[in-house]
Image (cartoon, rainbow, N blue to C red):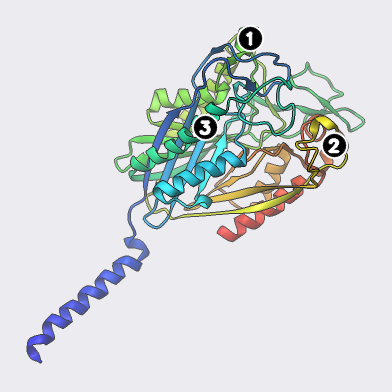
Amino acid sequence: MKKNFFPKVISLIFVILFSAHIYCPSCEAALQAGFARVDITPPAGVWLSGYASRKKPSEGISDQLYAKAVVLDDGQNKIAIVSTDLLWVPLGITNEVRGIVKKKIGIPESNILVCATHTHFGPKIDKIRKDWPDTPASKVDKSYVEKLTKRTAESILTAAKNTRPVKLGMVKGIISEIVYNRRTKRPDGKVAMTFRLPPADPNLVFGPVDPEVCILRIEDTDGAFMGAIVNYACHPVCGATDNEEFYSISADYPGYTAQVVEQMEGGICLFALGTSGNMNPVRIEGENHRSRIGKALGGEVLRRLQFVSTSAEIALKALKKQVILPLKKDLPPERITDPNKPEEILATEIQVLRIGDIYMLGLPGEVLVEVGLEIKKKAGIENLFIISLSNDACGYVCPSPAYEEGGYEPGWGTNLAKGAGEIIIKEALDLIGKIK
């Protein structure tokens, strides 16, 4: 008996210590992260998406388009975020990407967020209505869409291979001079759409903007910069200086913002669009408008990146849920997706990723800033990214007063009925509450 006593005690102590190591939060594996960038630039000749006035396919390439991904791993959970230089990504493509990634490396679908920068100079990849967004003759290049889907998934797979121990932190900046609310109101309370900033007019009242720039910095354990996520609410509609540029592929100002950061800091910068449905960039006289806006925003990002407190003690969580939104009744023929299957509701989704005390809320569609500001006001969270055009495209998401005020977004710009904005607000706050 005495011969067997000490080996048994030693074995028992080893089991206790090993179990404590597994279940002790302070003993969890260090946070890891990896980045990747994959070129998704289509060939010239594809139809571009974003301006209804285009009457022919693209004719050139002004700058490259990318899918940029970051994968985070806390030892228990993994999440992936991929930003694509596209007008939007429909839920069908998002789910294909998620399926590929889940099959290859096991990241759950609820933990993968796919967003679009909303460039209006990217390729047309779907037809959510018969004539959107160009002419009935415009076409989707199906072979390109297949490659796009695979390459978007590839960006996540490559990022997952590149993971190493990291620290991260969030900081906020402010830049208000490059953006304005295009839904200006007349004295009668109706909206006068000002797609270009008008001269000073005492009869026009400008609505709110969200000037916050939310920035996530990720660095290695020695403090060397690896990458960032930049979240800002301004519509990428910098336009073109001439007809040639109007028919050229471009990432618009988000591409230039990322370029500024990457050239100065190295690493990879993801752009995540805020609630910019009615937020337009201020027009700057002269050429290179998109470059100037991008550099202005990139400069603010660079300034703030220098002063970020980072930590490796980060736990990850993710949730997503289906959301049902009402559709307008009696839509005109050009707005009906399928005349053989008239619908009264639209099923889409929202998502929340939690990175320690940082929350990333993914909303579908082009969300008006008033919706985003209401969520920020009621969520009670200091570190909240709201990323529109996440995982799906569903038209403009407007607050109810917009339907009475008129204008493009609640009118011709969406099939969603009054009340959709309030549903998004409620569902977003509920989902945030569940993941806190």
The amino acid marked with disc number 3 is: Glu
Say whether marks 2 and 3 touch (CB < 8 Å): no
The numbered disc on residue 331 is 2
Give whichever of discs 3 and 1 has the lower sequence position.
3
Residue found farthest to the right: 188
The amino acid marked with disc number 2 is: Leu
182 relative to 312 in the view: left or right: right
- Secondary structure beneath label 1: loop
Within 10 Å of disc 1 (Cα), the crowding (few <14, some 14-19, many 20+) is few
Residue 44 location in percent, x, y?
54, 15
CA gap, disc 2 to disc 3? 31 Å
Name the one closer to the observer, 216 or 399: 399
The numbered disc on residue 164 is none
Comparing labels 2 and 3, the label whose residue is closer to the camera:
3
User: Which residue: 42% across, 53% down?
Assistant: 314
- Secondary structure beneath label 3: helix
List the residue tagged with mark 1: 241
Within 10 Å of disc 2 (Cα), the crowding (few <14, some 14-19, many 20+) is few
User: Which residue: 46% across, 44% down?
Assistant: 100
Residue 430 location in percent, x, y?
65, 57
Name the one closer to the observer, 309 or 401: 401
297 relative to 393 in the view: left or right: left
CA gap, disc 3 to disc 1? 32 Å
311 in relation to 223, above or below: below
Residue found farthest to the front: 340
Within 10 Å of disc 3 (Cα), the crowding (few <14, some 14-19, many 20+) is few
Comparing labels 1 and 2, the label whose residue is closer to the camera:
2
Picture quadrant where residue 414 is located: top right
List the residue tagged with mark 3: 146
